[in-house]
Amino acid sequence: MNKKPYQICKRCVMDTSDEDIIFDNNGYCNHCTDFLKLLENHKYVEGQSEKKFKDILLKIKERGKNKKYDCLVGISGGVDSSFVAHLCKVNSLRPLLLHLNNGWNTAIAEKNIQIMQKALGFDLYEYKIDWNEFKEIQLAFLKSSIVDIEMPTDLAILGANYEIANKYKIPSILSGGNFSAEGILPLTWGYHVKNDMKLYKHIVKKYSNIKIKKTPYAGLKENFINKFIRGIKTYYPLNYVNFNKDKAKQFLIENYGFKEYGGKHQESTITGFLQTYLMPIKYNIDYRRATLSSQICTKQISREQALKILDTKAYDEGKIKKDKLYICEKWEITEAEFDNYLKLKAKNYKNFPNQEKFISSLFSLYKKIKS
């Protein structure tokens, strides 16, 4: 996808597999430069961050006063969301745990959800997506050849969060998103401009024969209504604690019996397959670069350590073969059909109608007004 001469950042490990990457005279890329600037105001500072978190906790409790639940916490069976649930317990919050089941849970992920729910004693709501409809949506994204096959799941999670928050009159949502391992992600690797329903609906309409009726989503309109009219606020607790994913995982294992499931997003069969196999094979993208670069910027890992990790293969051949067969069976396509999709020209959001500039400008304006 990229015609630039190969270059890798001298500070992090992002490289020209991102077609939009820019390097300065020092050989530093725009991703780590921008992220480090962001961290100046948002990084964890002992004492200060805890104070900010304490203020947020007071707001959550006050907003949820006299309600059955004072917050909603999405839980996937992964480390981040499970640690947020743990923080709720130690800080005496009353969350409703919400799990969006899109049909791709691993057995370990489901076990971890059960472990955390039972140990913490919180209520759990499982939101099961209509599989037949969701399958066709995912296949539409596969056929489109866009790198963002996970976009339907991301928008479904957000849509389900708002739906359940409204159903139970919950005023606050707590997310496991955090700067620690997610501060860097190029748009060409993961189109995270929020709520671009123009792109989403275009792909579904062009590459499938269905209409989106049962699958939840939250576009710009739904976001505006829920944030500004209904007043639902989203908080990110992991940005206010000294969060290290590896240490958090070990803590959960030792204190709750949490089960190891592998690397980032490996709690989902499809997500793990897409990030470790499909992205490097078809799109020449090693997703680990973004995670490792974020960790370099937050000083959780050295650049030398990151480069050693990148020297290893992103996936296990045996596991990928099993996962590929399972995925094809669930999607009801042959492996030959899947291989044909791999041969299609790789695309990203730029190849489709989208609202990137409009939505980005709106959120930039919102941040200025908010500040």
Image: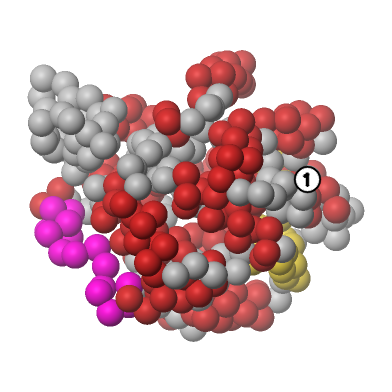
Tell me: residue 65, above or below residue 332. Answer: above
Residue located 47% across and 50% down the image: 143
Q: What crowding class fits label 1: few (fewer than 14 Cα within 10 Å), some (14-19), or many (20 or more)?
A: many
Left or right of 106, for residue 38 = left
Screen quadrant of the C terminus: top right
Tell me: residue 244, above or below residue 113. Answer: above
Residue located 39% across and 69% down the image: 335
Range drawn in magenta: 305-320
User: Residue 186: x, y in percent?
Assistant: 35, 36
Left or right of 144, for residue 29 = left
The chief SS type of the magenta part is: helix
Screen quadrant of the N terminus: top left
How many numbered marks, from 0 up? Answer: 1
User: Would you name the residue on which mark 1 appears?
Assistant: 171
Quadrant in which residue 44 is drawn: top left
User: Residue 289: x, y in percent?
Assistant: 25, 48
Left or right of 16, for residue 65 = right
Residue at the right extreme, as displayed: 66
Is 31 covered by the magenta stretch?
no
**Residue 307 visible, this angle:** yes
User: Residue 339: x, y in percent?
Assistant: 35, 61
**Helix, strand or loop for disc 1:** loop
- Looking at the image, which is closer to me, 7 or 303? 7
